[in-house]
Image: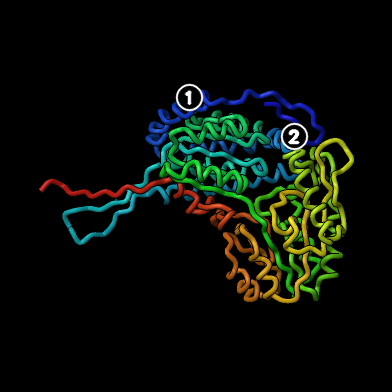
Amino acid sequence: MQIKNPADGSLLRDVPADAGEAVGHKATAARMAQPEWARRGFAKRAACLEKFAVLLVERREALAQTLTCETGKPISQARNELKGLSERLEFFLRETPAELATETVATRDTGTEEQIRLEPLGVVANISAWNYPYFVGANVFVPALLTGNAVLYKPSEYATLTGLAIAELLGDAGVPANVFSTLVGGGDTGRALLEQPIDGMFFTGSYATGSKIAEALANRMMRVQLELGGKDPAYVCDDVDPVAAAAALADGAFYNTGQSCCAVERIYVHERVWQPFIDAFVATVQGFSLGDPLKDDTYIGPLARRELALADLAAQVKDALDKGARVLTGGQRVDRPGFYFQPTVIVDVDHKMQVMSQESFGPIIGLMQVRSDDEAMQLMADTEYGLTAAVFSSDKARAEGILSELDVGTAYWNCCDRVSPRLPWSGRRHSGMGCTLSSYGISTFLKPKAWHLRGPS
């Protein structure tokens, strides 16, 4: 595999990919190594992950540079991702013991003790994402390792060097190489991984790929968790400061160059605040600095998916214009080396347009004027996805009333594009199944065993 920099197309490194035979060998080695890792006990496993957390801090700048060079994530945002990972690691280390604890169940039969003990799934496969490789990856491999599982980790081909860096950190922290094994490659490597005798599959990516994984594993009777895409809506009510709401939502839509799972992808604005909101929103977007992602002041970087992403965004703009929409700013590829697309704001849109119905995953947003909460609610619900939804209002009850009617995994009031380790991260419908984070994101890597314990009579 050739790893190239999306900012200028330069070659970063050649990396050998894992073919089917190599994937099989690594899966076999993981199967053999997992029981001993589980027998170590939580304290020894946690010591490795604590050391991993220390190494992340010590090597943060070099890791951020690697992440930026291979994905195009602006360097300040790469540093933020690594810094934010510390809180998640602290959460998992603190909360996992409670999830592992044996539960004694009361029984009327005084001669028999009943217990529930939790065991690791075994060998967990993790096909991870490129947009937040530390966050998304650690949401899976950290609790999986802490609960005694072995992990077969396939980073996205767009974040290969970061995936290898993660493996190096874990190895230096004391996690055996066969307990956390990295598989390098693209689709062929992923397909080979699905053929292995794994005990769980945890995937983050598109609905199209996720549905194929679900179909391929449907008859395997294993734990399958899919964190997929979204077309996340936000509604701006008529009782808010439109300038403040515009600043928050512009950041929610364009942070990480719009390549976030929970990025705001469509905005509905009450007609009473439409014009001041639009004016403030466009001004904010036009103020975003686009350029070299290694510069501290860059906010918009190149697209990680290169030509594929550029083509998708250009097609959405053309489709909207052909159907009567207007572009207020941006709308095309940037005339410079690298894979850049202008931050784009489109109005006069409707749900017949791709920009309002299909996932964009880039620096583009459609905004639509509405007359009432009911109209906004109906439009927000008009999607096959169900990841997040946001309402900006000075009235909490009003916002909660709207959000409670929407079939989404995460609801935001006066905020957006936010993830907490204390809360479950999950999607509905085409946004996936299962969840990471919170206590639910720990217990998903465990399976219960019922114990009936009766001493000799």
- Report x, y in % for residue 84: 64, 47
Q: Residues within 10 Å of mark 1 (few under 14, many from 20)?
A: few
Image quarter hosting the N terminus:
top right
Of residues 14 and 367, which is closer to you in this image?
A: 367
Q: Foreground mark, 1 or 2?
A: 1
Report the amino acid beneath label 1: His
Secondary element under disc 1, as helix, strand or loop, is helix
- Report x, y in % for residue 81: 67, 45
Of residues 9 and 327, which is closer to you in this image?
A: 327
Residue 78 visible at all: yes
Find the residue positioned furthest to the right: 335
Which mark is first along the chain, 2 or 1? 1
Q: How many marks?
A: 2
Of residues 268 and 100, which is closer to you in this image?
A: 268
- Where does label 2 land, which residue? 69
Secondary element under disc 2, as helix, strand or loop, is helix
State the residue at coordinates (23%, 50%): 452
Quick check: marks 1 and 2 in contact, CB under 8 Å? no
Q: Residues within 10 Å of mark 2 (few under 14, many from 20)?
A: many
Residue 25's disc number = 1
Q: Is residue 129 above or below residue 235?
A: above
State the residue at coordinates (59%, 43%): 209
How far apart marks 1 and 2 lie (CA) works out to 31 Å
State the residue at coordinates (43%, 34%): 197
Residue 289 visible at all: no
> Which corner quadrant of the image does residue 423 belong to?
bottom right
Report the amino acid beneath label 2: Cys
Find the residue positioned furthest to the left: 457
- Report x, y in % for residue 311: 78, 43
> In the displayed structure, does residue 423 sit left or right of residue 327?
left
